[in-house]
């Protein structure tokens, strides 16, 4: 009997995975509110005859004893996160804390009623792993690890005790999004917050003007950083830096560390009408990526105070000199960004000016190079910094877990797996520090438009992901 036959055929597999997904999604589980969902995981694991434990953070671990005769094999951890980004359709009345997602099967997809996102990221990967195990597939020593608060900075993974990973040889994360792909590396993140004390002087004679850039495309600071989109904060700062005659009273832009800014604006004082032709010309370079990016110059109330010339020069020199966009491509996976910077937010709160930057890099040397550049320009311009972050997961194409997955997939489908890295953060980044030497990879079922109300998973590929997991368990990892 083939593995497919033993699992009951494609239809039964799909139905079983969807049914398990529904069980795990019965309660709301946005990040930080995984309590009830965690109890559903615990109940499911107990139902399988296991003795799951939960740590203070809410993470869940269960040991799965090996099948008879496989006791001596290396330990594999199957891992995923229990929380979700619960996107909500405006005006739908959906409350992510109170309402479970409505799960629908429509036109070949597992999706929602479009009032909220689905949470297939990552409950669908977890559901597949649990359903496969429940079918009695043969396996070596296993641990199941389910984490909380992944979507808000890998916070649950940070709390995982090293003891939970001790003795394991490999970890397969199920948060991979694309069937047919194995991820073996991901970016570390560093949130930099740079601050400077503002020095003020009376505004010179002249008229107040507001210069704004709005309607930039923006986007995700990891997924979209290689697309060459405009950064209005940097563009406006560069233009202002070259025009010291314009006295600056304010300069603001962007909304989040990890979002490419779509806007920036400044209020200046000048005895005449500022000539913005060069800034308009600079926008021309972004006609393809940012077709709606618009420059506007409008009269503003004349401010009483402006930044002193020295403060102005230092501040604009710092902001316009920050790295933005791709810093380097990855040396092992040259099609993947290796390190990048996003100048996400700039603005004053009283006399304190703050610039928020998000750096990403899979390899520590790149992260250090990039942050040293920022530190050097901060030192020259009177900015001081603080940062938080998580480490990178530098990928190797020779990753033995990915190679084994590739052999299993090849045998099942006749096609190889794409072995690659991603320029966003995945939990192995954090787990790797707790268990040096642990071999890790990430795979997952196809999930489209995650973190949006259009999040969906094609039903006809769920069986393939289940077969890949089952095939790996049967083949073992040694
Ligand atoms: Zn995820």
Image (spheres, helix red, strand yellow):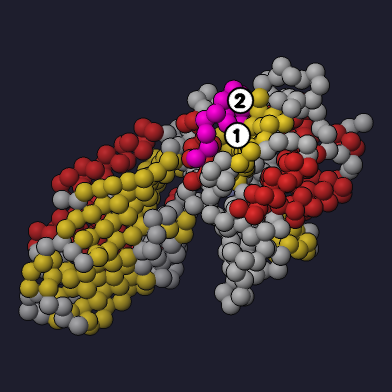
Q: Mark 1 points at which residue?
A: 441
User: What residue sits right under mark 2 in the picture?
Assistant: 168
Residue at (56% x, 41% y) in the render: 55
Q: Which quadrant would residue 353 be assigned to in this image? A: bottom left
Q: Is residue 356 left or right of residue 79?
A: left
Please state the extent of the stretch shown in magenta in the rendering. Answer: 159-171
Residue depicted at 64% across the width and 49% down the height? 38
Horizontal relation, residue 248 to residue 441: left or right: left
Is 340 within the magenta?
Answer: no
Residue 165 magenta: yes
Q: In this view, does 158 lie to the left or right of 4?
A: left
Mark 1 is surrounded, within 10 Å at the Cα level, by few (under 14), some (14 to 19) or many (20 or more) other residues, namely many
Mark 2 CB within 8 Å of ligand 1 = no
The residue carrying mark 1 has its beta carbon less than 8 Å from ligand 1 = no
Q: Residue furthest right?
A: 1
- Residue 389 rendering spot, x and y as whole percentages: 40, 43
Q: Where is residue 3 in the image (x, y as percent from the top left)?
A: 85, 34
Say which of 108 and 43 sits in front: 43
What residue sits 62% from the left and 75% below the top?
A: 92
Relative vertical location of residue 344 with respect to residue 294 in this rendering, above or below: above
What residue is shown at x 36% (from left), y 63% (from top)?
254
Mark 1: secondary structure = strand
| Residue 234 position in % (x across, y down) | 29, 59
Q: Does the CB distance between marks 1 and 2 fall below 8 Å?
A: no
């Amino acid at each position: 009997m083939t593995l497919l036959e033993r699992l009951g055929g494609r239809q039964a597999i799909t139905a079983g995975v969807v049914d398990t997904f529904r069980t795990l999604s019965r309660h709301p589980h946005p990040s930080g509110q995984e309590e009830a969902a965690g109890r559903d995981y615990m109940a499911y694991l107990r139902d399988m005859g296991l003795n799951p434990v939960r740590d203070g953070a809410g993470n869940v671990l269960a040991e799965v004893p090996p099948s008879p005769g496989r006791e001596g094999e290396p330990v594999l951890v199957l891992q995923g996160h229990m929380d979700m980004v619960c996107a909500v359709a405006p005006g739908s009345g959906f409350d992510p804390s109170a309402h479970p997602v409505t799960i629908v099967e429509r036109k070949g997809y597992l999706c929602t009623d479009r009032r909220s996102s689905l949470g297939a990221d990552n409950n669908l990967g977890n559901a597949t792993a649990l359903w496969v195990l429940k079918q009695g597939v043969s396996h070596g020593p296993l641990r199941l690890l389910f984490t909380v608060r992944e979507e808000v900075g890998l916070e649950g993974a940070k709390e995982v005790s090293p003891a939970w990973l001790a003795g394991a040889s490999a970890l397969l994360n199920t948060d991979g999004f694309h069937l047919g792909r194995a991820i073996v590396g991901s970016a570390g993140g560093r949130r930099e917050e740079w601050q400077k004390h503002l020095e003020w002087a009376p505004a010179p004679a002249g008229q107040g003007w507001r210069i704004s850039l709005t309607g930039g495309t923006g986007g995700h600071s990891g997924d979209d950083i290689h697309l060459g989109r405009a950064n209005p904060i940097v563009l406006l700062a560069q233009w202002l830096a070259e025009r010291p005659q314009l006295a600056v009273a304010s300069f603001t832009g962007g909304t989040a560390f990890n979002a490419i800014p779509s806007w920036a604006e400044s209020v200046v004082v000048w005895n005449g009408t500022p000539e913005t032709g060069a800034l308009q010309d600079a926008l021309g370079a972004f006609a393809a990526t940012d077709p709606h990016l618009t420059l506007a110059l409008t009269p503003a109330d004349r401010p009483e105070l402006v930044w002193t010339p020295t403060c102005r020069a230092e501040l604009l020199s710092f902001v316009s000199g920050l790295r933005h966009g791709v810093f380097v491509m990855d040396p092992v996976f040259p099609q993947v960004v290796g390190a990048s910077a996003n100048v996400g937010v700039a603005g004053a709160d009283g006399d304190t000016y703050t610039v928020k930057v998000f750096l990403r890099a899979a390899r520590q040397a790149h992260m250090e190079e990039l942050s040293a550049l920022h530190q050097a320009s901060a030192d020259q311009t009177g900015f001081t910094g603080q940062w938080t972050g998580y480490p990178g997961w530098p990928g190797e194409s020779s990753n033995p877990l990915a190679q084994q997955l590739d052999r299993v997939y090849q045998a099942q489908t006749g096609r190889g797996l794409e072995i690659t890295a991603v320029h966003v953060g995945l939990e192995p980044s954090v787990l790797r520090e707790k268990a040096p030497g642990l071999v890790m990879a990430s795979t997952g079922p196809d999930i489209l438009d995650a973190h949006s109300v259009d999040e969906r998973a094609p039903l006809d590929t769920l069986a393939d992901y289940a077969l890949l997991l089952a095939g790996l368990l049967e083949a073992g990892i040694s």
